[in-house]
Image (cartoon, rainbow, N blue to C red):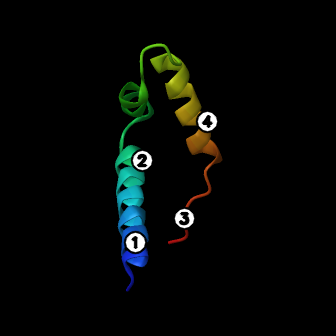
């Protein structure tokens, strides 16, 4: 495997781990972690997360 391929594989693993961690949080917890001063409120982020999760297509088992 080339250095580029290894880097892409590592980035993919990191992305997948971050997505899994975020998905394991409640919408409120995820919103609190995503909040930055000056951006959308925690309440707005929570609502966005809820809507996104409702639209998400479940992965095949």
User: Which quadrant is home to the N terminus?
Assistant: bottom left
SS for dot 1: helix
The residue beneath circle 1 is 9
CA–CA distance between discs 4 and 2?
Answer: 13 Å
Looking at marks 1 and 3 on the same chain, the residue that comes earlier in the sequence is marked by 1
Q: Secondary structure at mark 2?
A: helix
Q: CA distance from mark 4 to mark 1?
A: 30 Å
Q: Position of residue 48 (x, y in %)?
A: 58, 30
Question: Against 27, is 14 above or below?
Answer: below
Taking the spot 53% from the left edge, 18% from the top edge, the residue there is 40
CA–CA distance in space, label 1 to label 3: 21 Å
Which label's residue is closer to the chain start, 3 or 4?
4
Q: Is residue 39 above or below residue 31?
A: above
- Mark 4 or mark 2, earlier in chain: 2
Q: Position of residue 30 (x, y in %)?
A: 40, 34
* Callout 4: SS: helix
Left-right relation of 39 to 33: right
Q: Residue at x 53, y 35 (%)?
A: 49
The secondary structure type at the circle numbered 3 is: loop
Horizontally, residue 42 falls left or right of residue 17, namely right
Q: Nearer the viewer, residue 28 or 7?
A: 7
Which label number is shown at residue 59? Answer: 3
The residue at the far bottom in this view is: 1
What label does residue 23 carry, if any?
A: 2
**Comparing marks 1 and 2, which lies closer to the viewer?**
1
């Amino acid at each position: 495997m080339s250095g580029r391929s290894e880097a892409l594989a590592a980035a993919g693993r990191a992305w997948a781990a971050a997505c899994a961690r975020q998905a394991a949080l409640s919408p409120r917890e995820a919103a609190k972690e995503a909040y930055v001063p000056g951006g959308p409120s925690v309440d707005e982020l929570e609502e966005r997360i809820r809507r996104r999760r409702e639209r998400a297509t479940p992965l095949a088992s």
